[in-house]
Amino acid sequence: MENNYLPYPAQILKVVKENSQIKTFELAFTDQDRNSSFTYLPGQFMMVSVPHRGEAPISIASTPTRPGMIELSIRRAGTLTNAMHTMKAGDTLGLRGPYGRPFPLKEFTGRDLVFVAGGIGLAPLRSLINYCLDHHNEYGQITLLYGSRSPEDIAFSDDLTAWQDTHSIKCLLSVDSAGPDWHGQVGLVTTLLDLITPDPARSSAIVCGPSIMIRFVLAALSRIGFADTDIITTLERHMKCGIGVCRHCHMDRTLVCADGPVFSLAQLRGMQGTELL
Ligand SMILES: Cc1cc2nc3c(=O)[nH]c(=O)nc-3n(C[C@H](O)[C@H](O)[C@H](O)COP(=O)(O)OP(=O)(O)OC[C@H]3O[C@@H](n4cnc5c(N)ncnc54)[C@H](O)[C@@H]3O)c2cc1C
């Protein structure tokens, strides 16, 4: 019987510095069989561990349509994530998962998709965006609105450049504040919603970022006319087990690790205690 709490060793293949706080780690299980049989869906997360440093949930930032490795984008927050930022290619850490409910991919079929991300929130959306681009015949127009604190805080520049170069996705960026060298949009990410004209009847919105951002974006999307069932977001809670046993991440009667972390606004409206409404 497989032990659900057992992390499997994975080696860091490559580290990409996204900005001063975020690094993307390309990883592969050291066991080749596990690596080649590993499957997941966008929106799921891994429990990542470093001996003597702890364990934390981290969204999978890669897409299963590009198999053979797992990418995790990690922002320095505390003990574990600081330790990870000192690690380099060749180092080993522990991974267990994938866990959590993925984005509702079937519901997105045939629809325009509006992604709204803030900061590290682009990590799980990157998985879904690349998944959709690899199945581009199944989706309508894809738009990304991405907000960062300043031009220096913009992460995932390689992806943004690749997406813009292929014209496969319309990318609009904004920064909260900037010096004179920045010629792009200045303002909260919600200001970008004023620059696009999605048809709410044929679009789904997928939102991820800091709680305060999500709160304002959900309200703006509702005002534009998006149905609660067509607005999808993720909840972040401190988790211990990741598999619905310890109940550390419970909200109302919901466990964020097992019932989420992906929820529609319709589901959130039925839950008490969410900071997003
Ligand atoms: C589903 C999910 C997906 C995530 N995906 C990502 C991702 O892709 N990338 C990423 O960078 N982060 C992600 N996170 C957040 C990440 O898990 C946390 O930032 C991480 O737990 C920090 O671990 P740490 O050991 O470095 O920090 P810690 O040392 O745990 O501390 C970080 C901060 O959190 C506070 N804190 C710690 N434990 C608790 C607690 N129990 N209750 C309240 N506050 C507490 C600390 O006081 C400190 O301020 C995700 C979280 C969830 C739930």
Image (tube, grey):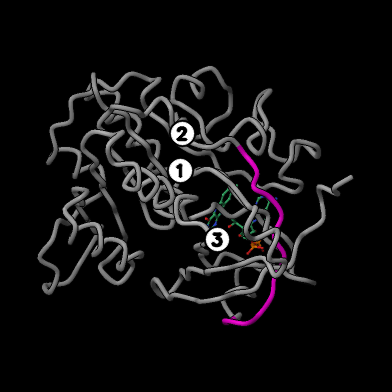
Badge 3 amino acid: Ile
Which element type, helix, strand or loop, lies under badge 1?
helix
Q: Residues within 10 Å of mark 1 (few under 14, many from 20)?
A: some
**Residue 97 is covered by the magenta coloring:** yes
What secondary structure characterizes most of the magenta part? strand
Q: Nearer the viewer, residue 184 or 88?
A: 88
Highlighted magenta segment, given as a residue range: 88-100
Residue bearing the label numbered 3 = 70
Q: Nearer the viewer, residue 115 or 265?
A: 115
Badge 2 amino acid: Leu
Q: Quadrant of the N terminus?
A: top right
Q: Nearer the viewer, residue 81 or 8?
A: 8
Q: Is mark 1 within 8 Å of ligand 1?
A: no
**Residue 211 disc label:** 1
**Residue 276 disc label:** 2
Q: Position of residue 110 (x, y in %)?
A: 29, 27
